[in-house]
Amino acid sequence: MVGARIELGVPEGHSEILRQDGASQSVPIREIRIAEFEALKRVPMWQEFIAPEMQKRMEAEYERCVLFLMAAVSKEFGDIGKADENTLFTFMAKVLQSAPPEGLGASFSDSTPFVYPAVLSKRLGSYASAVLSADAFTRMHKRMSLFFDNSDVIIAGTACAFNAMADPGLAAFPLRNIGLLNKKMQELGLDALLSAEYVNIGIFLSKLGDPEGSLGYFDKALAAHSNFAYALSSKGAVLFKMDRREEAFECFNKASAILR
């Protein structure tokens, strides 16, 4: 990462690193935030979460958590580029899960599919923990990718993978062993976190009894990543419940072909 520099807020709330060779990697935080607040507007019982003062509170807490993770890692390792990934990922899991003031006190039980309410309540699911961790790593010049299945989002470095929800002793494992965890995990770039957000919203709307609305969000995910198996299988499940069997099986078959 020689010559790397951090650009914060490009656009606002969008964490990005730029290198001398022109390559860039970013976490679409601003877009994720907008998508979440738009989805929460649809639910009467969640109206308190979209009030302007609550939005500001959630945004501030999100930023505090990212900076807390960055400070802890920097204090422990100094230059993150020189840190052994196994040790780095194990340490990050400890910081996420340790009680304050040593850590963030994350609890993965009874999690919400949305990042900002999850960060505020410290009930982080797989997706929310991946967004938070990927943002922190990326701001520290650590290039990452992601592994997806229908229940896990796992961050991948160059030698190890990081499962933020696992016990710290099991949070890091060699990339070559990813198949031992799930043989059908699909690897995508960090931009796919926004596509995963759209899938989460689609599933959320489906559970609220709005299947047509959910299909619109699955299509948004697929517009960005046409081969996103998680989006295809989720869309297929909703179509199946709507008795649109032919379309459902088309989605299932496409997802299966991608994961073979």
Image (cartoon, rainbow, N blue to C red):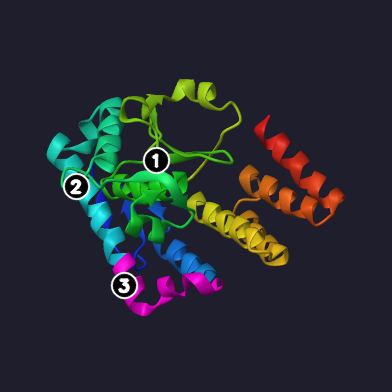
Q: Residues within 10 Å of mark 3 (few under 14, many from 20)?
A: few
Residue occupying the point 28% across, 61% down: 61
- Residue 90: horizontal and vertical position, in percent? 29, 30
- Indicate which disc residue 56 carries: 3
Q: Amino acid at mark 1?
A: Met
Q: Amino acid at mark 2?
A: Pro
Q: Amino acid at mark 3?
A: Lys
- Indicate which disc residue 99 carries: none
Task: Please state if 136 lies on the left or on the right of 109 as rendered.
Answer: left
The disc, 3 or 2, on the residue closer to the chain's N-terminal end is 3
The disc, 3 or 1, on the residue closer to the chain's N-terminal end is 3
| Residue matched to label 2 | 100
Question: Most prominent secondary structure in the magenta stretch?
Answer: helix
- Residue 243: horizontal and vertical position, in percent? 84, 54
Residue occupying the point 50% across, 69% down: 40
Look at the numbered disc 1 and give the secondary structure of its residue: loop
Which of pointers 3 and 1 indicates the residue nearer the eye?
3
Which of pointers 3 and 2 indicates the residue nearer the eye?
2
Q: Which residues are magenta?
A: 41-58
- Indicate which disc residue 144 carries: 1
Query: In terms of image quadrants, where is residue 201?
Result: bottom right
Query: In terms of image quadrants, where is residue 42?
Result: bottom right
Q: Quadrant of the N terminus?
A: top left
The disc, 1 or 2, on the residue closer to the chain's N-terminal end is 2
Magenta region includes residue 56 = yes
- Disc 3 from disc 2: Cα separation: 22 Å
- Please report contact status of discs 3 and 2: CB closer than 8 Å, yes or no: no
Look at the numbered disc 2 and give the secondary structure of its residue: loop
Magenta region includes residue 39 = no
